Amino acid sequence: MTALTGKTIVLGVTGGIAAYKAAELVRLLVKADAKVHVAMTESATRFVGPLTFQALSGNTVWTDPWDTRMSNGMAHINLTRQADLAVIAPATANFMAKLAHGAADDLLSTLCLARDCPLLVAPAMNRQMWSNPATQRNVAQLRADDIGILGPDSGDQACGETGDGRMLEAEDICAAIIAHFRPKLLAGRRVLMTAGPTFEALDPVRGLTNLSSGKMGFALARACAQAGAAVTLISGPVSLPTPSGIARIDVRSALQMREAVLREVGRSDIFIGVAAVADYRPVATATDKIKKTGETLTVEFVRNPDILAEVAALPSPPFCVGFAAESRDLDTYANGKLIAKKLQLVVGNLVQDGMGGDTNTVVLFDAAGRHALPSESKDDVARGIVAHLSTLLV
Ligand code: PMT
């Protein structure tokens, strides 16, 4: 059973090169247990054949407003009337203009106008078309009409240019659709988070760091955003893409992370420290590369500030969640951090379970005691943490 089990989604495909990504989107939605009905504009069929979508969805693909295959001849109304959600991916500039003005001159635009289900739109177009004031006016109108805009992404475009306007990847659109159906446990909350390791430079090329991959923090950022929160993620050096809809600030050292946190924390209701912050940094960073001069090298370290403890000690602190990564005696150390740092919640994990991999086993510690979550993927664990955290908020 998934968030999409029993859900019917109408996927509208319009005429852009990103139509090929819509095929993957159908595959992901079907895999996640949704019933998918595809409707295509005439120009979309020039990019990908309807047969591809029929094979992937297992359902008839609709292109013609005069199609008589619907028993009552009302394809233009029936499809979206029976749907839980309509999604247009890719949505061309032209199709968005039609949506903004309520035009209904083909099957897909008529389906959108006649719908009584929510609508999400994933724009895909050249950067110049996206930034054109006419398109931006249309986007603003769609938002005002309560139509969700997914993306667009930025990067290389099929036309050879680079900029905003690329359609989000199928995985991101699928995640946004799943999020649409999840309860919004953190709606209206502003979450500030840290994730990943820090890097404490010894010289221009070397430094002290740890094996945190950032996966747990990024999964939790994604889960918070999917639960309706506005998320700012301050990340140490990791090689992970930014989850959709999240504001990301990249930092390197503990001192940079602290500075970014203190700058942002005033705008946050919840602070979650997932980062594996180095407890110590070298007293001095050499300007030049340190040379091999002897058999041993002695480096003096100084204690880094504890960012989480500092946030929790603010005069009006946000709701503070810490992580505890231990190699043994998890309960003792995690409970110790809950009390010593004056936190509302501590997520305890053993480094051998949580660091680097794709799964984790965590125990939550709060004023009421310990709550073990099942061993699962970091995304599932993150959703479990969000569910518990939401019960503690006033
Ligand atoms: O990134 P992954 O590979 O997915 O691995 C995930 C993880 C194991 C790193 C993560 O689940 C985790 O446990 N993160 C916290 C790691 C850690 O540094 O724990 P700690 O026990 O040393 O610190 C306790 C808390 O204080 C943490 O919330 C930490 O962010 C915070 N802290 C620590 C030191 C410091 N100077 N400033 C801090 O804010």
Image (tube, helix red, strand yellow):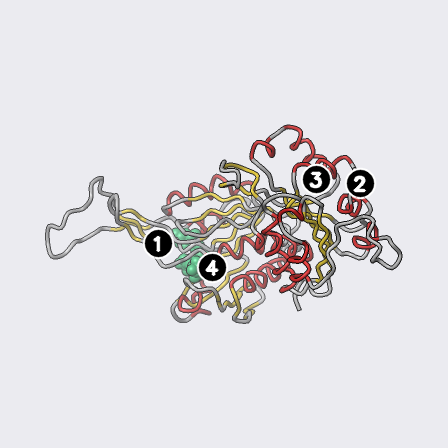
Q: CA distance from mark 1 to mark 3?
A: 53 Å
Q: Earlier in the sequence, mark 4 or mark 2?
A: 2
Residue 166 in view: yes
Image point (70%, 59%), residue name: 36
Q: Give the class, few, some or many, for how many residues have Cα within 10 Å of label 2's Cα (few <14, many ≥20).
A: some
Residue that label 1 marks: 279
Residue that label 3 marks: 95
As helix, strand or loop, the secondary structure at mark 4 comes to strand
240 vs 145: above or below: below
Quadrant where the N terminus lies?
bottom right
Q: Earlier in the sequence, mark 3 or mark 2?
A: 3
Snapshot quadrant of residue 373: bottom right
Q: Which mark is residue 323?
A: 4
Amino acid identity at mark 1:
Asp
Is 177 on the left or on the right of 218, as rendered? right
Asked whether the residues under the numbered discs 3 and 2 touch, taking CB atoms below 8 Å apart as contact, a structural biologist would say: no
Q: Which mark is residue 104?
A: 2
Closest to the observer, 29 or 181: 29
Please tell me whether mark 1 or mark 3 is closer to you in this view: 3
Is 297 on the left or on the right of 183, as rendered? left
Is 156 on the left or on the right of 45, as rendered? left
As helix, strand or loop, the secondary structure at mark 3 comes to helix
Asked whether the residues under the numbered discs 4 and 2 touch, taking CB atoms below 8 Å apart as contact, a structural biologist would say: no
Asked whether the residues under the numbered discs 1 and 3 touch, taking CB atoms below 8 Å apart as contact, a structural biologist would say: no
Image point (59%, 51%), residue name: 20
As helix, strand or loop, the secondary structure at mark 2 comes to loop
Percent of width and height locating residue 270: 56, 50
Q: CA distance from mark 1 to mark 2?
A: 61 Å
Q: Which mark is residue 197?
A: none
Image point (50%, 36%), residue name: 161
As helix, strand or loop, the secondary structure at mark 1 comes to loop
